[in-house]
Image: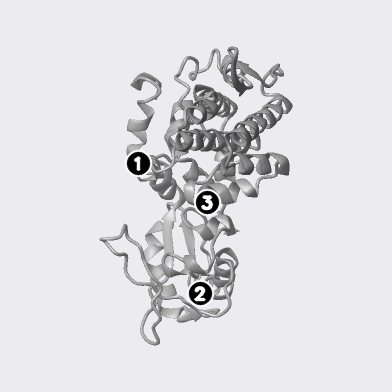
Amino acid sequence: MSEFIKGMDLCEGFFNDCARPIIERSFPDLIYTAGLIGYGSDVLGYDDAVSTDHMWGPRFYLFLSEADISKKNGIFNALSENLPYTYKGCSVNFTQPDPNDCGVQHPEFITNGRVNPLVFVYTFDEYLIEQLGISCLDSISAVRWLSFSEHRLLSLVSGKFFVDGLNCAGKISKIKYYPEDVKLYMIASNWEIIASEQAFVKRCGERGDDIGSRLVCARIAERLMRLCFLYNDTYAPYSKWFGTAFNRLNIPERIKQTIQEAVSANTLTQRENKIVEAQALAAEMHNSSGLTDAVDYRVEDYFGRDIKVIFADKFAQATADRLKGTDLENLPLIGTLSQLGGLSSFADEKEFYPQIMKLYKSSDLL
């Protein structure tokens, strides 16, 4: 491959230059949607040269109506027989899915025969069921929202439709971000989790447990970062891209810098001061959001001990109070499993969503 080109640009050019003429020549009356959404660093704009080794290259999704899905094989065959072997230095041909590696496909250069393009053909409802386990996005229960993988939600709303004859963009807009009650629950949960360890950065450190102090500081820092996503109505990606996405958030640079200084601090005094300062900055974001009445806080001693806190539980309680009368009232403030690093093999898979929902409510509210 020649000079690296971002995957989204590559795929849009490939569709318009190569695939669209074939589709519209072979099926002139077809009404369809095509674009790049779902899995992949290229969808999120985080791809680089390392990303090109698998499931990356000239590719797109093609969505057909129920009336036209029977044309799926014919369309794929037309593309396979007429697409070029390369596009902008990238192979258009890919290996067959590897059954021993989650169906991963790799680019494979060829010079004769039919190509096996990385083109996926679905009805949009089929695709949504594959991604979320449901196709109707009009009345999603709060508990079901909590079961969804946040990274999958991000990947669905971050893509681009190159042509949208079926108005898939209108349908996907219904999950643009969490509804307010779910957002409030997640905010309350993150403050509650911070509150549960707010005194331990100092307490661990003063007992000589430096690594424990660092770990607690890092956990609080992650929760503060997640609050920044929530206050900005932005889905957070899973751990590989979490820090990258945080650094791109449209939030004051001071909070980014303070969190960075907290997790990199080599002295206990600096670590405590910076993580508490970061909590105060997040508290200001909360009070500016208007989601609750302003919460009165200050940096103070933890029940008379020489440990600085802002009493994060006040923010958890103020936010939880806004959930009264909703299905999320009185739920344990545990957030979502997709917000826990290292659980993506469980939390991101739709077949486990029914089990995840049981963490929150009995089956009659699912």
Q: Give the secondary structure at mark 1.
A: helix
Residue 160 location, x and y as percent?
Answer: 58, 56
Give the quadrant of residue 261: top right
Q: Farthest residue in the bottom direction?
A: 111
Kind of residue at badge 2: Ile
Q: Mark 3 points at which residue?
A: 241
Q: In which quarter of the image is the C terminus?
A: top left
Q: In this rendering, would 2 be left or right of 288?
A: left
Residue 5 position, x and y percent, is 59, 71
Tell which of 212 and 130 is nearer to you.
212
Name the residue type under label 3. Answer: Trp
Q: Which of marks 3 and 1 is nearer the N terminus?
A: 3
Residue 92 - label: none
SS category of the residue bearing label 3: helix
Residue occupying the point 44% across, 27% down: 143
Q: Is mark 2 on a helix, strand or loop?
A: helix
- Residue 126 is situated, as x and y percent measured from the top left of the image, at 40, 49
- Amino acid found under the numbered disc labelled 1: Phe
Give the residue at mark 1: 346
**Which residue, given by chain and number where applicable, does mark 2 sit on?**
22
Between disc 3 and disc 2, whose residue precedes?
2
Q: Using the numbered discs, state the Cα–Cα distance from disc 2 to disc 1 in whole angstroms.
A: 40 Å
